[in-house]
Structures are given as C-alpha cells and as structure tokens.
Amino acid sequence: MTPKYLKLIKNDDGVIKKKIATANEILKSCVLCPRECKVDRSKNELGICRTGKNAYISSIHSHFGEEAPLVGKNGSGTIFITYCNLMCNFCQNFDISHEGIGNEVSIKTLAQYMLTLQNEGCHNINFVTPTHVIPQIIAAIEIAAKKGLNIPIVYNTGSYDRVEILKILDGIIDIYMPDFKFWDNAIAKKTCNAEDYPEFAKNAIKEMHRQVGDLIIDESGIARRGLIVRHLVLPKNLAGTRSIMHFLATQISKNTYVNIMPQYRPCGKAFQIKDLSSHINNKEFIDALDMAKEEGIERLDMPFLRELALA
C-alpha cells in the first residue's frame, strides 16, 4: 500500500505546495490548535507552544515501545517534537513538553531525520505531539519524499486538534494515532487548562477516521494505514473510560484499534491534583479493559497485558 503523500507528489498538480502555503500562512496569525494564540510565528513570536518559525526536536530513534503494528521487527521511527499545545500537568515527558528539552532544526534537517530513520529500517515515521508544527512537517515530507522517503507517516497526537487544520493533512498522513485523554470538561480544565478538550477530541477523531478509516495491517503484521486510538487509564476513572469507549464504538467504528494503556504514574505537576498523585492499580486497568469490551471494542492492542496485570 503506497503512502498517501507519494500519490500527492507523483500527481505533481501543486496540491502539496498549496497545502504548505496554506499552513505557512496560518503561522502568521497562528490558529493551528484550539488555543488560537494568533501570534506571528513566522517572525518567531511565541504562544502557548513556545515554538516559532522552526520546529524543535527532542530526539529521533527507532522506538520499540509503541503499538505492536507500528514496531514490527525494526521499530517505529519516532521523532519527538519539543513542546506541546496541550500541556498535561502529569505528562510523562514533562522535560520535553514543558521544559523544552531539544534543539531547533530547519525543515531540511527534519527531512533528513526522516530519511535517516528509514535507512535504519524503521517501518514508519512517527511524529510525537506534532500539532503545533504541522507546516514544518508537511514541508519536510515533500523534501524527504523527493529524496526517497516511502514509508507511512504517523501523526501521534493528544487530540487537541482543529478539524480545519486536520483537513490540510488529508492525503499526507497515513496513520493517525490520537490519544483520547478525558471525557469530562472539568478534568480537562484541571489537568490541561483546556475545558473544551473533549469536544475538540471527538471532532478530531471523527475527521481522522474519515481520512484514513480503520487500521489496515499487512501480512507481515505492520500497520499501513488507518486509525489507532490510545487511552491512558487514570486513577479513580478520571479519564472517563467507559464514555470514551462508547463514543468510539458508536460514533467511530467497533473495529477501531484501541490501546488502553496502564502505565500512568504521577509525573510533572500531577501532585497538584490529589486524585492524580498515585499510580493506577491492577483492578483499575482490568476494569478499563472490561469497559472497552462491554461497549463493543474488541480490537485491543497487546491483550496479554490483562494476564500480566493479573500475575
């Protein structure tokens, strides 16, 4: 299955250049994400994401801790974007998302990173927290594709995304991997100062599924195209797991590939919220798996985690 961005470039009808131009124009009064800071990032003015004209990158490497269909034998080619537009107070990559660990890179360097990861045998290019650097990513993909990039692009996001911006990515992204974090507006307000997060996440995931559909895995077990939804289980069911699973089953697809994640631990400023100051326990994780299945979600990543939790 040919990556979608290659078809755009092969057609040579100027579509990808129009997408790049549209995205760059948005940078001049930035509304890439729901924060809508409206700063001129083309002149290096900074908003919530603290990123100007160029992207900042924390690290690039072949990652073996991602979902099974992304990892395969050689790993997922992960590019960790510095900073974030959501800024969860419990972020497990707090030094990257909040403290800005990373280096500024040009679009040409970003393109070379993709080619390097492909040359190492990675099965995909996996952009982590890409929402605030969409213009730079699209431009880098065009450069890399013309130099031989031919593996799927993964958009690995917290789901605080605007549908209008996601539409620019239509035809470029092969695999969307949104994390549906919270169902309750009050929890989103406490943790991210983003009371409107649930509504944006719902609309974003609908648009992502419209573009790429259910996850397609090839005969070797590698994801080629489609939607993967992540959901981190929070203590005391603060994430609203059942409601999220019901939404996915009834408004997206019962065939949605879902990774229910048990690795929550209090990081960053999580201790500012009493209920987030402890790890989850085995029962909370098993209950979350049960909720997913009861709501009609059967396509779960790494189902052996249930056995591990019970061990």
Image: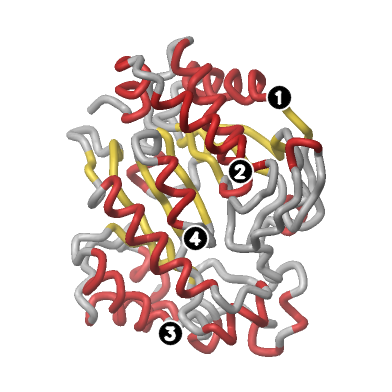
In the rendered structure, find residue 283 and report the number of the disc placed on it: 3
In the rendered structure, find residue 26 and report the number of the disc placed on it: 2
In the rendered structure, find residue 153 and report the number of the disc placed on it: none
Above or below, 231 relative to 173:
below
Residue 221: which quarter of the image?
top left
**Horizontal side, residue 245 vs residue 78: left or right:** left
Q: Residue at x 53, y 72 (%)?
A: 197
Q: Quadrant of the C terminus?
A: bottom left
Asked if the residue at tag 4 contacts the one at tag 1, i.e. Cβ–Cβ closer than 8 Å, the answer is no
Q: Which amino acid is tagged 1?
A: Ser
Residue 224: which quarter of the image?
top left
Dot 2: element: helix
Above or below, 282 relative to 207:
below
Above or below, 229 relative to 5:
below
Q: Residue 102: image x %, image y %? A: 77, 39
Dot 3: element: helix
Q: Nearer the viewer, mark 4 or mark 3?
A: 4
Q: Residue at x 56, y 38 (%)?
A: 23
Give the residue pinned by disc 4: 159
* Label 2 Cα crowd, 10 Å radius (few <14 / some 14-19 / many 20+): some
For the residues labelled 4 and 2, the Cα–Cα distance comes to 19 Å
Q: Nearer the viewer, mark 4 or mark 2?
A: 2
Q: Quadrant of the N terminus?
A: top left
Q: Residue 268: image x %, image y %? A: 75, 67
For the residues labelled 1 and 3, the Cα–Cα distance comes to 46 Å
Dot 1: element: loop
Give the residue pinned by disc 1: 106
For the residues labelled 1 and 4, the Cα–Cα distance comes to 25 Å
For the residues labelled 1 and 2, the Cα–Cα distance comes to 18 Å
Q: Residue 215: image x %, image y %? A: 25, 48
Q: How is the image coloured?
A: secondary structure
Dot 4: element: loop
